[in-house]
Structures are given as C-alpha cells and as structure tokens.
Image: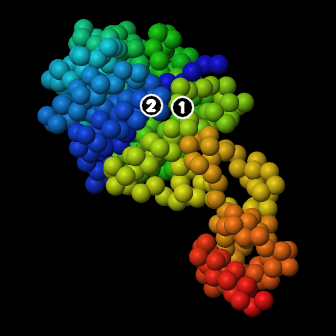
Amino acid sequence: MKNINVFDTTLRDGEQTPGVNLNFEEKLQIAKQLERLGVDIIEAGFPAASKGDLRSVKEIADTVKNSSVTGLSRALTSDIDACWEALKGGAEPRIHVFLATSPIHREHKLHMTQAQVIETAVNAVRYAKERFAKVQFSAEDACRTELPFLAEVVEAVIDAGADVVNLPDTVGFIMPEEIRSMFRYIKNEVPNADKAVLSAHCHDDLGMATANSLAAVEGGAEQVECTINAVGERAGNASLEEIAVALHIRNDFYGKSTNITLNEIKRTSSLVSSLMGMQVPNNKAVVGDNAFAHESGIHQDGVLKETSTYEIITPELVGVEANRMVLGKLSGRHAFKEKIISLGYNATEEEINKVFKSFKELADKKKEITDEDIFALMADEKAGD
Ligand code: KIV
Ligand code: ZN
C-alpha cells in the first residue's frame, strides 16, 4: 500500500491563526505530541520572522528525532541562512522555500515577470540545496497559476534540486475536480515530475480543504499539508485528523495509508485547542464533542443494537473513550433504560415505563436531561410508590 507523507504545519500556518501566539514551551510541547502522533514532517516555524521563532525551530529540530523538522523561508538568501542556523543540527536538515507564481501575485505583490519568478525560484532552490539534505519548494497560489507556466516552474525547481514540490491552494479557491486534474496535469506534463514528491496544501475558505487534499491524492500528490483542528490563516488549513481518518476508513477507495497513530488524535486535538485557546466546534468531524454523540431515539436504538448503524468510525480508533447518548426529547426508551442501568438502578419494566413518561414531559421543557435530572425523576417515582 502506498504511503502518504503527512506534513503538519500547526506550528507555522496554524500559528498564523488570528489571536494565536504560542510561547517557546508550548511549541515544544505540541511538537513532541506531533512526533508521538506519527507526523512525518513538522513545520516548526518561520526562522527569519523573529529571533523567538528561530530559537523554537532550533530547539524542536534538536529535540524531535522521529519526525523530520522543517522551517519556512522566502526565496531570499537571508531567510535560507536563518533556516540553516535553526535546522543545521537536525538529523536530516530540511527547508521549505516558497515563492508565488500566480498572475495576481506576480503583478500586485512581487512585480516580477514569469521569467523572473523562475530565475528567483531556481536560485533559491540551488542555494538551499548546497546546505540542506532536503529542499521543498512551494509555488504559492499555485491553484490560480496558468497551468503551462506552473509546469515550467515545477520542472525548473526539480532540475535545480527540489526534492518536494508543493502546489498550494493558498486562498482556498479551487474545487476537488480541478485540483485532481491539476495534479494529474503536472504529473503527466512535467518530464522530471517523478524525481520529486508532489505535495498538496489546501486552505478552507470555501470549506473544501479536506475534499481538495483527498482529490489531490487521487491526482498523484504523495504528501498532504495540514494542521490539527484545521487551525490556520483566515478559515484555516486542511484538517490532519479528517484526512488521516478518511484515508484509513476509505482505504477501499484511496488505497493509501499514512504513518499517523490514529488513537493519538483526540489527545493532540485537545492539547492544541487548550494551548492555542481555540475551542474545537462541537460538530467538528472526528474531534468535536458531538462527533460520537447520539440524540434521536432511532439513532440511539440503532447504536445500542450495533454501533456501525450510525458510526462509521469507533471512538476508540481516534482515542475517544466512548460514544455518548444524549438524553433529550427525541430520545427513546432503549437509551433511557440503558442510562437508568448505568446509573446503578435496578428498576422494573413498569417503573421504567412510568419514569420514561415523566422524562418525556421534562424533556419537552429542557434541551438536555442530565444525570441529576434522572436522579430526581427516580426519587419522585420512589416517593410516589
Ligand atoms: O498557503 C500557502 O501558500 C502557504 C505557503 C507558504 C506554502 O502557506
Ligand atoms: Zn498556507
């Protein structure tokens, strides 16, 4: 089975989340957990951005041994030097150099022609390759770049020594069918494409980041770039947990695997959420509080009989202790009875029927029925005997 490399950028793109600022110890703690999670490459920061970033990237590179550590760099020798300073102590120093390629960025941001973009990218990759064991080049805003020009850039940077070429959807604009075709086009049209790993890096501005990352894999991407809890610039990045679990559960469809230790997912999500001060939405796929909660009577009855009726992944798979039956007005007798038993009551069927009636009356007035409510209902029932 072909492996997909997982490149985690929680500590770089994820730290670009408005309002998030991790300190040195917090970054190190997250990096160690990402290593435990089985991430292949950890993007630890942007060393040229600040002395603090350089220091934390260096500390992470010197500490983490089972994941490769990288740092971001613009296509400038000064940035590449800062990355080298931070990463030279690592077992296999790896750099991530980027330069925008799209017409919008060329015209309004870089003021460069196509030829200047290629020359700058090639010079940066060559300079980096003289120092680093592994060089990744990202064509920023690749998904809004003219395809023939993108192909020229990819061919030139691979010739210059790039080991990985990343084609980011920087502004979350592309659709799954398009990104699949874009990767296929690059794989088929670039003569030296098989000499580098192609990587996808998707943003979530239209809610497509996971779907686009998976479509890129179908198109030939062998590396996906993502963050824990989908944190990141604007609407965020592709979610590591969603991609890893989708590739695992739909192995029948993708036929690809990752090195992610899936039962470390929940722990990693909780750590990142608490250190970043970013609450995970309750309905977030895989790691949200409601991801394994069931409220309607029909669903509860199904899950109590056989979990696979309404759960496509088991909670244990991703490190969640158990599923949860939420008692509310839509709940049925089956889940209610299980709750009574789990709270230690030895009630007769007749008692359960009576309390279930009172429970339904209460549930009509209250969104969620708590254990305390059940204790009170049972006490009323006993008192009425
Ligand atoms: O979204 C993007 O294009 C990036 C690059 C720096 C890879 O984060
Ligand atoms: Zn990004």
Q: Is residue 324 left or right of residue 307?
A: left
Identity, as a three-letter code, of the amino acid under mark 2: Arg
User: Split into 4 quadrants, where in the image is the C terminus?
Assistant: bottom right
In the rendered image, the vertical position of residue 61 relative to residue 384, given as above or below: above
How many numbered dots are placed on residues in this image?
2
In the rendered image, the vertical position of residue 299 relative to residue 80, given as above or below: below
Q: Position of residue 208 (x, y in %)?
A: 53, 45
Q: Are marks 2 and 1 in contact (CB under 8 Å)?
A: yes
Query: Which label is found at residue 36?
Result: 2
Residue at which label 1 appears = 261
Q: Secondary structure at mark 2?
A: helix
Work out whether residue 370 or residue 38 is closer to the camera in this orientation and state it.
Answer: 370
Mark 1 lies within 8 Å of ligand 2 (Cβ measured) = no
User: Which residue is depicted at the point 47% across and 33% down?
Assistant: 37
In which image quadrant can residue 292 be found? bottom right
Q: Position of residue 34 (x, y in %)?
A: 41, 34
What scheme was used to colour the molecule?
A: rainbow
User: Which residue is depicted at the point 63% across and 33% down?
Assistant: 248
Q: Position of residue 178 (x, y in %)?
A: 56, 36
